Amino acid sequence: MSSPLHPRLAAVLLLAVLPTPAPAAGTAYELDRAGAFSVTTGHGFDFGTAPGAGAFYFSITVPEGNWRVTVECGGPAAGDTTIKAESRRLMAEGLRTAPEETVARSFLVNVRNAKLPPPPPNAPGGDTVLLTEREADSLTWDDKLTLEFGGPAPAVRTVAIEPAEVPTVFLLGDSTVTDQRHEDGAGWGQMLPRFFGPAIAVANHAESGETLKSFVTGLRFAKVLSQLKAGDWVFLQFGHNDQKQNWPQTYAEAGTTYRAWLHVYIAEIRLRGATPVLVTSPQRRTFDADGRIRNTHGGYPAAVRAVAAEAAVALIDLETASRAFYEALGPARASLAFADSGRDPAHHNNYGAYQLAQAVAQGIRDAGLPLAAHLCPDFAGYDPAAPDDPAAFNFAASPAHRRGN
């Protein structure tokens, strides 16, 4: 007998199947007149928060798709606002306003639910992505566009939204890429939107524990393919979990099946007119006696590089960049880039994820991808061998913390 769904996960799936009326194009919400979120109004302050008591959330019921969001920051007092969307995706940071000044910022938020187009009668497949219990509290899979306003002094006047038909960068990968839902963890994928201008959407489909095989069997790749269109981009970063031989259902040997699976993904992406990009996995924080990072990924980074060459696919070598980043900090300070107050050697905190996102942005530029034209004007470039000083890294943490932190 199959186990029952987690109650909150069941609620997410139920909401996903309910019809959702689209707000009218250019719908604007004046936050000084807004109340608490309700299903009836379809918008409002969420999770028991409101302006004036630190970070607060504002949610709007919308259908899945890309949404252009324009936020007017400002208020009677000076403001300093950082904006995140859905599960802590960084959209804008350090928006400073003088008293009574207004500053507008536009960005794109990808919203999705777990539903799939149902397969024809008697055909294999499914009509719902197979979410895990750990995704029960994720804001990624519900029927709302949720904005988190934080920073030293969040000040917001209005929020306006409209549907946007724009190219999308889909991110496929594991826990080092995913939108981590709680402090102090972070994946580089949830920092990446901050480095794009308002003409590119980022859809982060990465999830903890995923492999090339499980991304197919869990229907996550089917979800991506159902939305993929010509002109989109798909970044693939797997390997952390594919190498686990103690997971026989999803283990893929580096020199054979792992490479074959990468070729399958590339073919499916190209079939739909989109562009695949391969990304090597960041290394774990494992120093040798000489202060150099040891390779804990075996032949997987080399396999990714080989497939990129064989298939003429752009490569972003995050494995090499992560080595340079950790070694620049050195054994005594590299833990400052990792989650669980540095006790986790594989997963990053906000600082570490932010650095790796910059390395990805630089990789886009170095690869000569047309996507580089859409990087934010304030992205001056990044050298992982000269990372930002962690002591000077000032980042607005989210209210959502893991239990015990």
Image (tube, rainbow, N blue to C red):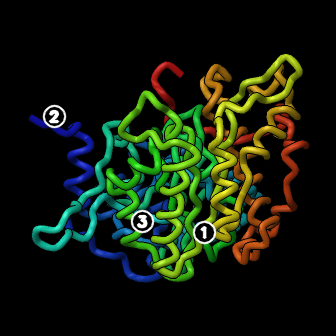
Give the alpha-carbon distance from disc 3 to disc 2, as whole Å: 27 Å
Residue 332 left/right relative to 82: right
Q: Is residue 334 above or below residue 254?
A: above
Q: Residue at x 45, y 23 (%)?
A: 403
**244 or 356: which is nearer to us?**
244
Q: Tell me if 47 is positioned left or right of 384 in this view.
A: left
* First of labels 1, 3 by sequence position: 1
Image quarter (top left, top right, bottom left or bottom right) of the C terminus = top right
Residue at 74% from the left image edge and 60% from the top image edge: 361
Give me the disc on residue 224: 3
Say which of marks 1 and 3 sits in front: 3
- Label 1 secondary element: strand
**Mark 1 crowd level (few <14, some 14–19, many ≥20, 10 Å Cα):** many
Would residue 259 be seen by someone viewing this image from the given angle? yes
Q: Earlier in the sequence, mark 2 or mark 1?
A: 2
Instruction: Report how far apart the C-alphas of labels 1 and 3 lie in the structure.
Output: 21 Å
Lateral position of residue 337 relative to residue 186, left or right: right
The percent position of residue 164, horizontal first and vertical second, equals: 50, 79
Q: Secondary structure at mark 2?
A: loop
**CB atoms of marks 3 and 2 within 8 Å:** no
Measuring 58% from the left and 47% from the top, which residue is drawn there?
255
Query: Where residue 285 appears, x then y in whole percent?
Result: 71, 28
Alpha carbon separation for disc pair 2 and 1 = 40 Å
Q: Amino acid at mark 3?
A: Val
Which residue is farthest front?
256
**Which residue bears the numbered disc 1?**
107
Q: Residues within 10 Å of mark 2 (few under 14, many from 20)?
A: few
Amino acid identity at mark 2:
Ser
> Is 308 placed above or below 82 here?
below
Residue at the disc numbered 2? 3
Q: Nearer the viewer, residue 138 or 361?
A: 361
Which residue shows up at 72% across the image and 39% down it?
A: 351
